[in-house]
Image: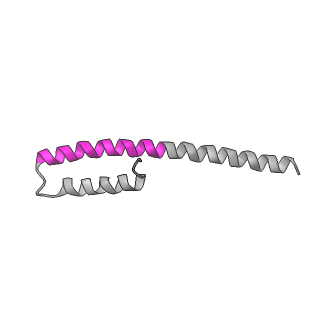
Amino acid sequence: MTESIEKKIDKLNTMIDKIEEDQTSIDDAISLYSDAMTLAKQSFEDLEKVKQKINIVKKEGASLVKESHTSD
């Protein structure tokens, strides 16, 4: 099962907080940054899929509205 977008964003925020901590080593910060960039890319891809689904639903809804007006 894939993680929700909300959980990915929460993880990103946690990673950012850790990167900004003074006690985080440079090596750890670089590793966190790399992981965060991967997670951000996945989140953007997930959001794009959601956007596409919304557009499909909107088109289907508009089609139904047209059909109901033409059948009156």
Residue at the far right: name it.
72
Q: Is residue 35 magenta?
A: yes
Q: Quadrant of residue 46?
A: top left
9 on left or right of 56: left
Image x and y of residue 17, in percent: 23, 58
User: What residue lies at 57% left-to-right and 45% top-to-bottom?
Assistant: 53
The percent coordinates of residue 6 (x first, y second) are 40, 56
* The furthest residue to the front: 1
Q: How is the image coloured?
A: one colour
Q: Is residue 10 left or right of residue 61?
A: left
Residue 60, x across and y down, in percent:
69, 45
Please name whichever residue, 3 or 23, is drawn nearer the observer in this view of the structure: 3
Magenta segment's dominant SS is helix
Q: Residue at x 51, y 46 (%)?
A: 50
Residue at image x 12%, y 44%? Answer: 27
- Residue sitting at x 78%, y 47%: 66
Q: Position of residue 21 (x, y in %)?
A: 16, 58
**What range is drawn magenta here?**
26-48
Q: Is 48 on the left or on the right of 33, as rendered?
A: right
Q: Is residue 35 left or right of residue 51?
A: left
